[in-house]
Image (spheres, rainbow, N blue to C red):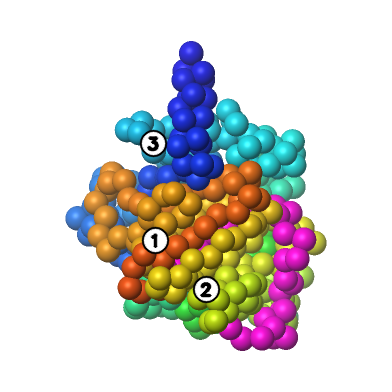
Amino acid sequence: MAEKNTAAQARAALDGGEGILRLAPTWVPRSFLMPGGRLKLSREDLYALGTHRGGIDERWFASTTPAANEGAPPDEGLSYVVHDGGRFTLADAIAAHGTEMIGQKLWDTYKRWPVYSKFFDNLGPIPHHMHQSQEQAQKLGLEGKPESYYFPPQLNWTGNNFPYTFFGLEPGTSKDELRGCLERWNQGDNGILDLSKAYRLKPGTGWLVPPDVLHAPGSLVTYEPQWGSDVFGMYQSMVEGRRVPWELLVKDVPEQYHHDLDYLVEQLDWEKNVDPEFKAHNYLEPIVRRGGASEGYVDKWVVYGRVDGKQLFSACELTIQPGRSATLKDPGAYGLIVVQGSGTIGKLSVDSPNFIRFGEVTQDEVFVTAKRAGEGVTFHNTGSEPFVSLRYFGPDAHPDLPQVGDHRKAPKG
């Protein structure tokens, strides 16, 4: 009965929004990090789930992936559709109307929306860590996690404490040197950052991050399209003077390898970590996809490229000038968040709020079904400032997706 009721609710929401669903904010805490306070969530609500759960430093978008947090309720990380006073998970809506929601190919292949995106917002840096590959994660019945970054200018009005990200390891680093860092775990700072290199982060740019590559994200607000998984392993024993428990290193490692230092070293993709051309192979700058000043809008690729030859996710930034409109057709479903201004998306009114209380339903996030995306969606700016949104797509959505490095030969827009 409950499944039938959810299917009926989803049908009503799909019909009412003409294939565009309004989503409530999905807040996620992290007990081992310090929130940066730039997600527009009221400061008095940063610890709304209790200090034992940690501060809320993430907001997840169009997510059907649960957050892998200790002590979390089963729906933490899941997005909820809101319609006509009711609410139900996006995952349930997709389960009920899969082909219409995400397209025949994705439904046949995955039977779910296999990606998600988030903002993460921290006061300081995150520990140097990696995300397991599909082969490694499936040993525990989990999914691997490639990911990507884009630093939206609208949320990065301040860089906070450390707007630099360490990536990989210095060329020439040996596996024995990394093993030594793990051996020193309980002696304070294990010195792993001495083996790495930091890059200064710039709003309006991004990175593609393959699995099994170490990275210690800096303190810019980051838009992060990624595979639908929450696996990770922390390789840094202390960050900003705070202890990182060994349990966070081996959270997604088979139990028999929890103290096998050789296994933990070999988890890393060594070639990618010590790549002397790491930036050339992973750095992203926006590329104009369509539109221009004379048309009153511009749509840019901000996340693109392939991970190990596979197109897993991508994202665009759409800017509509005041009083102008654009009708866009896309070859796949997408999750969307408004980051500046106000307008309409199809028949739904949307705007980017300045202040959000925990539990409040905003009007800045939607999910556009594959069917509606293919038919075309009209975006109209109803305000006096640019109307800017970010939207991300699932795997194999675009036959014309640029490659990493293509920004160097693309015209600036």
Q: Earlier in the sequence, mark 1 or mark 3?
A: 3
Are the residues tagged 3 and 2 within 8 Å (C-beta)? no
Residue placed most toward the observer, 99 or 111 = 99
What segment is highlighted magenta in the picture? 387-413
Q: Residue at x 27, y 63 (%)?
A: 354
Q: Is residue 403 at all visible to an observer of this figure?
A: yes
Residue position marked by numbered label 1 in the rendering: 343
Q: Residue at x 68, y 63 (%)?
A: 210
Residue 259 is inside the magenta segment: no
Kind of residue at disc 2: Tyr
Residue position marked by numbered label 3 in the rendering: 83
From this view, report whether residue 41 is shown above or below residue 180: above
Q: Main secondary structure of the magenta part?
A: loop
Answer with left or right where residue 313 lies relative to residue 65: right
Task: For marks 1 and 3, give the CA distance.
Answer: 19 Å
Kind of residue at disc 3: His
Mark 1 surroundings: few (<14), some (14-19) or many (≥20) residues within 10 A: many
Residue 398 is inside the magenta segment: yes
Q: Earlier in the sequence, mark 1 or mark 2?
A: 2
Residue position marked by numbered label 2 in the rendering: 297
Q: Nearer the viewer, mark 1 or mark 3?
A: 1
From this view, report whether residue 406 is shown above or below residue 106: below
Q: Nearer the viewer, mark 3 or mark 2?
A: 2
Q: Position of residue 219 (x, y in %)?
A: 42, 72
Mark 3 surroundings: few (<14), some (14-19) or many (≥20) residues within 10 A: some
Kind of residue at disc 1: Gly
